[in-house]
């Protein structure tokens, strides 16, 4: 029973389990079905939601993309945000649109540009898994910035120690405007020079910002006139390769405040390069924003990853560089009018006290002063330098006229010499159509040569000796400022030597003496009130300066350097001071009053001396000065002006004029003409115009000094050009208006009877007070042939006239083109005449008369006078032949 019941119970439990299994399977099937239904519904909802999100995202992106592009264009204007393959890179319109604070690095997949801040930050550190990608990014950024920036508002210096040549993309611009993109440096020494200059720039900007209360460089630009003070971008490839401890020190100093000072660094960091000992690369990198380039993607903090732009095509870069150079050529620096530098007219010509000074321009809103003084501290002399066309002549004119407006002629005299054959100084003296001149000018070398420059230095050296005696007479005073005001106190002297190195270039005795005198002048001139301005384009390679550089420039504390090369900047300012190479525009200058010390550089915008303004000023000063004598004017390769000499000097009986000396004097070179054998003048050599000028000076000065008007016989053996014929006619007209009897004979007449007639008058004692002017005896035909009706040749008669005439009052002034022709006509002794004046003549003939040691470099409008009485021959400048329109003026002057 019990077993049956157990079996029944087992069967019932089995049925129950089977029913439960069936029920569970059904529920599971229903649950699986329900789950599948729910999955299908979820998938449908997700698809619907995703489609809705995608639609909304697409709508938002389509609305945001134009805004993003506009924002990119605003932050990175012009070419700073345009892709490299865009056609606008070939347009001139967008070059120089503005200085961009942001720059493009790439674009999103949708083509939206990605721009990042750079110029107003300390800069970027760029890392990459491929160095070439990082270098290309730096290259691209450099081209974008220089193309987008306004002319001269950005300068890029690059350090490329591995010689990758990445900056070669801008090489075309480097060649034309190295002040915008200098050639990349490769050595640590070159980098030191760049960084040292940047340290000076940063220090100066910090001082100005503190003075004006500005935190950042861009605020300083808005406040000041220094529009040429550019942003500075420094690119370092393959950092820390090639960086030593000195460069690292300067890099850290600069990068710490770079963003505030308008300086920015682009540093390509090569993690595979080991830094030098004591160079911790992390110190610099921590100061810069991170930019990571991975394959063709670029990542910058707070910006979405962007696709890196492809490199620029070389032809596109060359075209853009050409356009940048053209714009730089047309860029104009705002100028400061010269009148703005002048004081109020009520203060003009104030008494000189301890110094003389003037304003040459402005440093921001501050007048830039040049103060010449002898003590406390001593600032006696100035060295001015600059490349061709950078405003050196304008600067000198500003300095000269600024001083002339402040100090009267009795207190300031000027000696102005231009050795570069320019015309800048010509307007400062009198001219045919300009009767006025700068009244302070004592000597004016419009086209000075070395000989006249040496003569001026000799004169000034003598002036120092004269002033020394004045000092001694006042109790051995040591400084001109200690002399009491009055007629015995000499005026200050300003000596301007433009291209002074010409004096010292040749390896000869003249250069040696000039160097010694120049050294003496700058050394002793300080105490005696003599201030020297030495102006030059370059002084490199001048032999005489190599041995006396310190002796001369060690006395010249003022240095003014206009834009020039780094080498010349250091030559003018001081070794290591390349500030003048950083200048951008013509008219900018570095003014330094401490022997060129880099810590004392002053950035100056020199005022512009407009010619009409200066001419008006000179006329006003000349009228104010009243009766003031004109300056001694010297022109290279030009004859002297007889009317000027006649206005300044009275002629003396028996001392006719041969011309002017190459010296600081208005006294002409005179010769003794006594009624005794040996009198007369033999003019020898080529030069039709000069020969006529010599005869003109001799004849007019002789006639002017005579008590009774002498008689002249003018014999012309030339075939003269019309201009020379006018000069001959003018001479004859002057002599006749002076009351002289003048008889003229030319080669087309029979000259022989006139010569025999003069000889007959000589023999009968009737030739007195007569002058024979032989213009071209070498051209008279048949001089050695017996003339018809005479047993002797005309040459025999001429020889007797020249030899025996002086004792009877018949003096000969004659011109022959060669010494041997003169000797053939006058005999071996040349009729005993002692005075020879050589024009352009072979040197052997000159030495035959004046001695074997004489050197005569024949030049137009120069003569060599040998009279046998003085130990050395003297160079003279013959007078120009008179023009017909000068006759009345000449007569008026010589009759004074």
Image: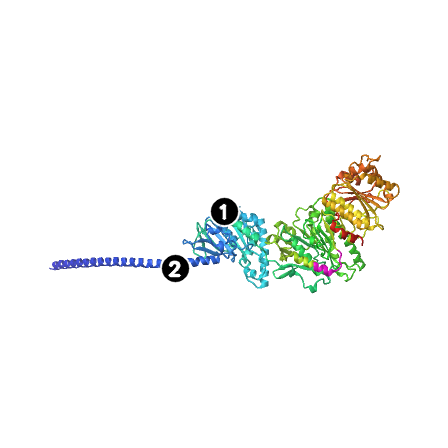
Q: Is residue 354 left or right of residue 136?
A: right
Side of 601 where 741 appears, left or right: right
Q: Which residue is mark 1?
A: 315
- N-terminal label among 2 and 1: 2
Look at the image and say whether residue 591 sits in the magenta stretch: no
The reply to whether residue 342 is in sight is yes
Give the answer, above or below, for where 387 lies relative to 805. Answer: below
Work out whether residue 659 can be spotted: no
Query: Over which residues does the magenta segment extend?
Result: 619-629
Depth check, front residue: 598 or 102: 102
Q: Residue at x 78, y 49 (%)?
A: 734
Question: Measured from the top left, where is residue 580 in percent x and y?
Answer: 62, 53
Q: Is residue 182 above or below residue 795?
A: below
2 and 1 marks in contact (CB < 8 Å) = no
Q: Residue 366: name its quadrant.
A: bottom right
Q: Which residue is mark 2?
A: 60
Place of residue 119 in the rendered image (x, y in percent of width and height, measured from the top left): 52, 56
Image side of residue 884 versus residue 587, left or right: right
Image quarter where the C terminus lies is bottom right
Q: Quadrant of the N terminus?
A: bottom left
* Count of numbered circles in the view: 2
Image depth: mark 2 or mark 1 in front: 1
Question: Which secondary structure is most common in the magenta stretch?
Answer: helix
Q: How far is disc 2 from disc 1 in space, using C-alphas? A: 39 Å
Measuring from the top left, give residue 797's x and y in whole percent: 84, 38
């Amino acid at each position: 029973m019990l077993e049956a019941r157990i079996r029944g119970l087992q069967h019932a439990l089995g049925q129950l389990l089977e029913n439960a299994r069936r029920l569970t399977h059904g529920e599971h099937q229903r649950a699986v079905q329900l789950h599948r239904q729910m999955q299908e519904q979820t998938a449908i909802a997700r698809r619907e939601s995703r489609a809705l999100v995608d639609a909304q995202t697409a709508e938002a992106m389509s609305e945001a993309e134009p805004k993003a592009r506009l924002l990119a264009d605003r932050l990175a204007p012009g070419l700073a945000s345009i892709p490299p393959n865009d056609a606008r890179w070939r347009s001139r319109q967008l070059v120089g649109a503005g200085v961009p604070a942001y720059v493009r690095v790439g674009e999103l997949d949708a083509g939206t540009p990605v721009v990042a801040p750079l110029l107003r930050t300390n800069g970027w550190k760029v890392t990459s898994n491929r160095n070439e990608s990082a270098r290309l990014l730096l290259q691209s950024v450099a081209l974008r910035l220089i193309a987008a920036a306004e002319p001269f508002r950005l300068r890029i210096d690059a350090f490329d120690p591995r010689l990758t040549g990445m900056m070669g993309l801008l090489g075309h611009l480097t060649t034309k405007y190295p002040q915008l993109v200098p050639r990349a440096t490769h050595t640590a020494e070159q980098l030191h020079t760049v960084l040292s200059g940047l340290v000076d720039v940063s220090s100066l900007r910090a001082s100005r910002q503190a003075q004006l209360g500005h935190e950042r460089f861009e605020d300083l630009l808005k406040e000041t006139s220094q529009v040429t003070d550019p942003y500075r971008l420094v690119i370092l490839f393959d950092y820390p390769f090639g960086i030593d401890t000195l460069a690292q020190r300067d890099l850290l100093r600069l990068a710490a405040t770079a963003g505030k000072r308008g300086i920015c660094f682009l540093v390509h960091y090569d993690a595979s390069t080991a830094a030098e000992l004591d160079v911790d690369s992390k110190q610099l990198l921590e100061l810069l924003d991170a930019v990571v380039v991975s394959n063709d993607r670029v990542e910058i903090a707070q910006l979405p990853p962007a696709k890196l732009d492809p490199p620029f095509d070389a032809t596109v870069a060359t075209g853009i560089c050409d356009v940048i150079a053209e714009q730089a050529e047309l860029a104009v620096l705002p100028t400061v009018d010269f009148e703005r530098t002048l004081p109020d007219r009520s203060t003009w010509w104030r008494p000189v006290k301890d110094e003389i000074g003037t304003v040459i321009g402005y440093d921001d809103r501050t007048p830039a002063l040049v103060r010449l003084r002898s003590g406390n501290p001593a600032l006696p002399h100035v060295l001015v330098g600059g490349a061709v066309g950078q405003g050196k002549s304008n600067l000198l004119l500003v300095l000269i006229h600024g001083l002339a407006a402040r100090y009267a002629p009795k207190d300031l005299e000027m000696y102005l010499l231009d050795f570069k054959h320019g015309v800048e100084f010509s307007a400062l003296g009198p001219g045919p159509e300009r009767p006025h001149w700068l009244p302070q000018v004592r000597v004016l070398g419009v086209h000075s040569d070395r000989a006249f420059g040496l003569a001026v230095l000799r004169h000034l050296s003598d002036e120092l000796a004269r002033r020394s005696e004045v000092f001694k007479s006042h109790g051995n005073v040591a400084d001109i400022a200690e002399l009491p005001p009055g007629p015995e106190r000499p005026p200050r002297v300003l000596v301007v030597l433009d291209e002074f190195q010409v004096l010292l270039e040749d390896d000869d005795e003249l250069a040696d003496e000039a160097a010694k005198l120049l050294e003496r002048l700058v050394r002793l001139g300080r105490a005696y009130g003599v201030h020297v301005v030495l102006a030059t384009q370059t002084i490199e390679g001048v032999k005489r300066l190599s041995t006396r550089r310190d002796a001369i420039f060690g006395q010249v504390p003022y240095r003014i350097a206009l834009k020039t090369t780094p080498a010349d900047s250091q030559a003018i300012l001081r070794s290591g001071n390349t500030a003048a190479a950083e200048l951008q525009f013509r008219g900018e200058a570095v003014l330094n009053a401490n022997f060129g010390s880099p810590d004392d550089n002053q950035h100056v915008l020199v005022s512009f001396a407009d010619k009409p303004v200066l001419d008006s000023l000179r006329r006003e000063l000349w009228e104010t000065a009243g009766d003031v004598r004109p300056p001694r004017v010297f022109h290279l390769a030009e004859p002297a002006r007889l009317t000027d000499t006649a206005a300044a000097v009275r002629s003396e009986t028996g001392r006719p004029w041969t011309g002017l000396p190459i010296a600081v004097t208005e006294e002409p070179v005179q010769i003794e003409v006594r009624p005794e054998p040996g009198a007369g003048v033999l003019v020898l050599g080529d030069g039709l115009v000069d020969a006529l000028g010599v005869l003109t000076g001799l004849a007019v000065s002789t006639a002017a000094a005579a008590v009774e008007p002498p008689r002249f016989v003018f014999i012309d053996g030339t075939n003269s050009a019309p201009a020379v014929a006018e000069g001959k006619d003018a001479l004859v007209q002057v002599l006749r208006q002076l009351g002289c009897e003048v008889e003229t004979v030319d080669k087309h007449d029979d000259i022989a009877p006139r010569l025999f007639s003069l000889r007959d008058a000589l023999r009968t004692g009737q030739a007195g007070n007569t002058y024979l002017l032989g213009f071209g005896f070498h051209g008279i035909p048949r001089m050695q042939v017996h003339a018809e009706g005479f047993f002797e040749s005309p040459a025999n008669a001429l020889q007797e006239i020249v030899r025996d005439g002086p004792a009877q009052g018949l003096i000969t002034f004659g011109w022959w083109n060669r010494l041997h022709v003169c000797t053939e006509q006058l005999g071996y002794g040349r009729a005993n005449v002692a005075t020879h004046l050589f024009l352009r003549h072979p040197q052997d003939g000159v030495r035959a008369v004046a001695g074997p040691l004489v050197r005569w470099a024949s030049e137009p409008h120069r003569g060599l006078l040998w009279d046998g009485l003085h130990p050395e021959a003297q160079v003279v400048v013959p007078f120009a032949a008179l023009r017909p329109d000068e006759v009345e003026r000449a007569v008026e002057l010589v009759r004074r």
